[in-house]
Amino acid sequence: MKLYLAGPDVFRPDAAQWAEHARRLCRQDGHEALIPLDGVETTAGLIQSADAVLANLNPFRGCEPDSGTCVEVGFALALGKPVIAYLEGTETTVERVRRLQGGVEAGPDGRPLDRDGLHIEDFGLPLNLMLAVPARLVAGGLPEALAALSQA
């Protein structure tokens, strides 16, 4: 399968080494990695030519996943592509906000609030419903996402 690898990994200082490692992992499972760093096509073209998307949805520059990765996931889902999203752990959104923002308060209605007084989605999921429900979530990294793909 051709697998589009979505995520903020392209911003890492060792992005080229990460990409080569990711390609090796995919090849070991008999897949071809399509990585935005390859630069031969637009991201949209790479996603369109992929059979599936593996997306790193770990927090990036805050409590939420990279916004560009979220767009790529949405585009893939709109095309009917399977999406396997991976996160380092299984903490809920409320737990992650509590950890990264130094606390969560209960609002007047008992719903959790972040440090800015905004409600936090409290469905016991590690991501917003719009990501957690249509994507298959996996705890771990790219190797675990590849394993989940082979079980699908």
Image: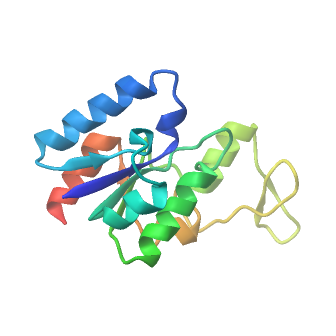
Q: What's the residue at 50%, 60% (across, down)?
A: 72
Number of marks drawn: 0
Left or right relative to 38: residue 110: right
Q: What's the residue at 83%, 72% (across, down)?
A: 109
**Front one among 59 and 114:** 59
Res 137 quadrant in image:
bottom left
**Front one among 63 and 92:** 63
The percent coordinates of residue 143 (x first, y second) are 25, 41
Decide if residue 134 is in sight here: no
Q: Is residue 28 above or below residue 94?
A: above
Left or right relative to 86: residue 104: right
The percent coordinates of residue 6 (x first, y second) are 44, 50
Q: Is residue 104 above or below residue 88?
A: below
Q: Is residue 73 above or below residue 16?
A: below
Left or right relative to 105: residue 92: left
Q: Where's the N terminus, which quadrant?
A: bottom left
Left or right relative to 7: residue 148: left
The percent coordinates of residue 17 (x first, y second) are 36, 23
Q: Is residue 13 above or below residue 108?
A: above
The percent coordinates of residue 43 (x first, y second) are 47, 55
**Front one among 80 and 58:** 80
**Front one among 101 and 52:** 52
Res 134 quadrant in image:
bottom left
Res 129 quadrant in image:
bottom right
Decide if residue 71 is in sight here: yes
Q: Residue furthest front?
A: 40
Colouring convention used in this rendered image of the protein: rainbow
Q: Where's the C terminus, which quadrant?
A: bottom left
Q: What's the residue at 56%, 71% (across, down)?
A: 130
